């Protein structure tokens, strides 16, 4: 899933037909490029296809879903204006808050919040981060809030750094792969997105069975959809925002939300991400 997902054949055919029937419009000739990071459950092809179909039908634009292996790659494309919008993590959103604008925030289990989980192999009897000292520890991505920053900030409060507290650390570049690493014994513990873990508990119970939650963090702002600040008032951004906010209004939209296990999307406010900024500062202070 690291390649660009091109607009569907149906969208291309419909676009060509429309172009012969009426003068070209911005929606007919301009593609909405929407980026997805590993915070998204991007291994589900049906989910991606349904999301693309819904966004095309609702926004009026052909949609190109863009995936990459790392958060940094998608963030770079977004900040540089090569993407119209992307579902990113709160960590890069805060890091580039002077160059990005908020489009929407997902709502999960009634709130736009989620947690970071510390995982361990099942049966170890560990109860806190301190018990994981000396582990081989799996992180999802260096730019992930739940999959890195939350744990790094907790260690900073203990005057510790991941690279010295743990025997060894590794980045899997997928929350699902953090679970796999702990479940298989490649890592003794890991930091993972609690939303992803809870969805995996429903759809892949055998995968999470060899793992257990050591601790769940405080509630954190859910990973947002963001756009380049220069595109904040663009027609494409507004069309995307409306499509996300109205996802509960149609059968196709509700089908996407069901696959995502989300309730919908909310506007959100930039100050909502203040806890992530504070975590960043605590890690930076330690050096």
Image (cartoon, rainbow, N blue to C red):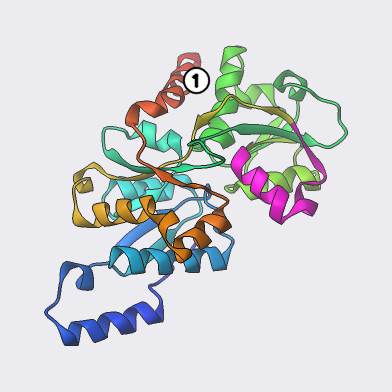
- The residue positioned 46% from the left and 65% from the top of the image is 252
Location of residue 120 by image quarter:
top right
In the image, is residue 247 part of the stretch drawn in magenta? no
Q: Give how far across and how far down residue 276 sits, in percent.
A: 45, 26
Query: Does the magenta stretch mainly form a helix, a strand or a loop?
Result: helix
Q: Which residues are magenta?
A: 193-213
Residue 135, image x, y percentages: 75, 29
* Residue 70 visible, this angle: yes
Q: Position of residue 25 (x, y in %)?
A: 15, 71
Q: Residue at x 54, y 41 (%)?
A: 141
In the image, what residue occupies the spot 55% across and 21% down? 153
Q: Residue 191: percent from the left, percent from the top?
A: 64, 35
Q: Report crowding for label 1: few under 14, some 14 to 19, many 20 or more residues within 10 A (C-alpha).
A: many
Instruction: Assess whether residue 205 is covered by the magenta stretch.
Output: yes
Judging by the rendered image, the residue that carries numbered circle 1 is: 283
Q: Residue at x 27, y 48 (%)?
A: 80
Q: Relative to 54, is 36 above or below? A: above
């Amino acid at each position: 899933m690291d390649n660009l997902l091109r607009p569907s054949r149906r969208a291309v055919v419909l676009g060509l037909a429309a172009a012969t029937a009426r003068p070209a419009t911005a929606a007919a000739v301009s593609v909405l490029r929407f980026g997805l990071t590993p915070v998204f459950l991007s291994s589900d092809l049906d989910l991606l296809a349904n999301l693309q179909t819904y966004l095309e039908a609702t926004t009026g634009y052909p949609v190109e879903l863009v995936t990459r292996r790392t958060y940094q790659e998608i963030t770079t494309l977004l900040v540089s204006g090569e993407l119209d919008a992307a579902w990113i993590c709160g960590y890069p959103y805060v890091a580039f808050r002077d160059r990005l604008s908020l489009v929407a925030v997902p709502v999960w289990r009634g709130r736009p919040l989620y947690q970071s989980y510390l995982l361990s192999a099942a049966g170890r009897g560990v109860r806190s981060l301190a018990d994981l000292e000396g582990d081989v520890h799996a992180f999802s991505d260096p730019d992930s809030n739940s999959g890195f920053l939350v744990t790094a900030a907790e260690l900073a409060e203990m005057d510790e750094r991941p690279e010295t507290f743990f025997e060894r650390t590794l980045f899997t570049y997928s929350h699902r792969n953090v679970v796999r690493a702990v479940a298989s014994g490649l890592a003794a513990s890991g930091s993972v997105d609690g939303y992803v873990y809870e969805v995996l508990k429903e759809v892949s119970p055998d995968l999470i069975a060899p793992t257990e939650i050591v601790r769940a963090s405080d509630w954190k702002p859910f990973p947002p959809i963001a756009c380049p600040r220069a595109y904040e008032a663009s027609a494409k951004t507004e069309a995307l925002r409306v499509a996300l906010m109205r996802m509960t209004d149609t059968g196709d939209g509700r089908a996407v939300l069901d696959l995502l296990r989300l309730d919908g999307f909310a506007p959100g406010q930039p100050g909502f991400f203040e806890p992530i900024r504070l975590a960043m500062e605590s890690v930076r202070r330690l050096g």
